[in-house]
Amino acid sequence: MMSADSSLTKFIREQKSMLWRRLPFVALSVLMYFLYYIFGTVVLIQHERAIVDPNTALLAQSLSQRIAEAVSAHAGVRGIGSGIGFTGAMILGIQSFSYLYKAQTVDFYESRPEKRSVRFFNIIFNSFLIYAIPSLICAVLSFFIAAASGAAYMTLFGDIMLAWVLNSVMFLASYGMSAFASLLTGTVVTALFMNFFVFGLEMLVRMTVFGYRAAYYATFDSDNEIKLIAGLKSLPPYNLIKSYVEAKMFGGFDAAGEYIVKALPELMKGCGINLVIAVISFVLAFIAYKYRRAEDAGKAVVNPYISVFIKYCAGILFALDTGLLIYWIFGRQGSISLPAVILTMITTVIVTCLILEAIFALNVRSALKRVYDMPVILVISLIILFIFKMDVFGYDKWLPSASGVESAWLCNNSYDIGIDGGYYDETNYIGAREFAEKNMFITDIEDMLVIAEKGQAAKVENAVEYGIENEYAANGYWNATVGWRMKSGKTVTRNVAIPEDIDAAVMDRIVGSEEFIKGVYLLDDPDYIIDRVDEIAPGSELVLSTTSEHGNLTGDGRLLNGFLAAYTKDLSANYDFTMASYNVPVGLVSFYTDNTFVSGYTGYFQTSWPIYDSYKESIAYLEENGLWNGGSLEKSEVEKIVVTTYNYTGEMSVSDDPVTYTDRKDIEKIMDSSLPTTYYSAWGRYYQFEHDGNKDYSIEVYPAPDTVEDMEPGTYYYRQLLKDKELPEKPL
């Protein structure tokens, strides 16, 4: 038996006493986790039962699998239970030491025969109990509820328990930060504001840096640098949110637990970061608690140095952010925006310093205290502004050392294969850029450095003339992204504008390489869909189709492998920068499903490949299988041409009345003076369509009825008038 005076007995007695005094918070924790885990699981199960058609078993998936997937997405690592824990951590962090905010309660607790270190530990442990017991019990019960409904998968149990462990570590990190923030203040209100400051400071710094890079660096790649905001190194709750997003990307529940295995490295990395943050936070909180004085009760901030730190951080960040806001409002016109930005920053610094000093002293009359901080904060803010504006550290001119690069990738930003579809990776659609990142590994670093250097210089030049945000304003360039995979493990990207007069030989070596082609054209991945065709919902079909100016033809999707074999040969023999930039596609081959579900996909699936005249192997294969009836229209196959002229004045355009040409000589002249643009070219030289006098022409070519398969009335195709070419006289 334990002695009534033993340390353990005292500890248990103290924990019971504290739980009783904090009963409202215990009840709130029980309620929130009951609603999230138990009630939420019941609702999801009932929903799955309601939507399952017993005759089809919902596309070959059993009810138990559906329930497991739903519960996994809700209560497992892909769920949002961490949000409840984070909110509870902030509430408990403020409440735990709220007795220090009143002199009477401070005197009462300080008079007890109890060491500060013991009381600190008791409070921390008690707060964790309030979170841990209800959340763990409800999480386990959610699994048993799912198991009782047929989803008794141990993988699901492991998923839920892993999520609870991750959420618990995140709770500790968040609670430690909240407790530390609360111990720096002397009132509940200022404790709340201090929590916002501690949790939001790093995020605000990241967002400010992101905003200034986007505003002042022409080659800034926002798609990659968004990691500044949501990176794993961000403080709670952001680091584990990033991990949960990564976990979601690996697909849904599977009994083998592959999705957990794939996500585990990211999840454990986030967990480790949170553990480090938790330890540091508790150490700092204990130091603040141990050396806190009784007379600090009722103060806004207990330490004057902390007040100065907050004042400088807030003043600088608010000045920079309001200046950035004005910069965007004025459209980045340097002569207009810079004076407005500086004036706004001056005003923001003055207002912020006045308000904070009044809050720190809890007296409006003290607002003018330490006015000498204002010019210092303003100077620091202006220095940071001009560091970005003048690109002091050479961000836009940076090029890696060839010896430090493992591989590179290059993505033409204006080009995605497909019309309504695109690329895909496992069960997710992805963009051209992401596909290139995952599949393009260029090792010709010297040529890539030539492209990047010229592209970055052109991007800066265009930004000066047209503004950073208007990347398509200048003709004669291809907007692209260059990515460098460094041997150090770091990935660096830059947006560039590749000039059309770039050395074609350099571009041919890159664009014509097997490495580049694999990162642009989807050649292998569709195979797994064909292999799993029996799993596709009843009534669905895989379709391989071709479209050209001679109409549309469709065939069996199983022909895809043969087509890709021929297409790969054509790419190897014909595809390079010169071919793609001086020719236009004459047709498009598409692979798609005719219904809305393909074994793991939700939504319509399609991906496409352009066909050029020089792709003889592909055209021959299509002809053998009845899927090719010609590319672009011949002059003799055109019935009429309708031309609309557009006159541009600034950002406005006014169109003339359409002119219809039916005379055979006029049709031939227009066909000789234009190029087809029905299908987009990856490296098309669209400067060849520029015209003097701010004019543009829309040319609609109407084929004769007997030249196109299944032609609907009014079918036409687009062409564009070449530079320095003229249209025939308007017909009378």
Image (tube, helix red, strand yellow):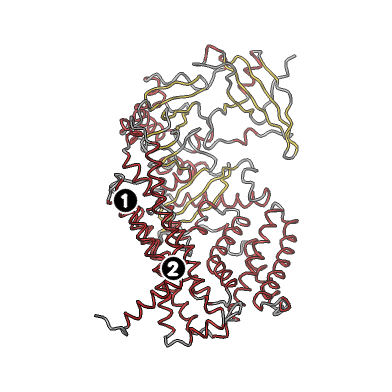
State if disc 2 and disc 1 touch (CB < 8 Å).
Answer: no
Q: Give the amino acid type for the residue marked by disc 1 in the picture.
A: Leu
Residue picked out by circle 2 = 173
**Residue, x 71% and y 69% (percent of image)?**
351
The foreground one among 485 and 371 is 371
Residue picked out by circle 1 = 156
**Residue, x 68% and y 31% (percent of image)?**
696
Q: Quadrant of residue 660?
A: top right
Q: Give the numbered dot on residue 396.
A: none
What is the x, y in percent for residue 701? 60, 20
Circle 2 SS class: helix
In the displayed structure image, the side of residue 357 where residue 536 appears, left or right: left
What is the x, y in percent for residue 474? 64, 43
The foreground one among 267 and 579 is 267
The foreground one among 20 and 147 is 20
User: How many marks can you see?
Assistant: 2
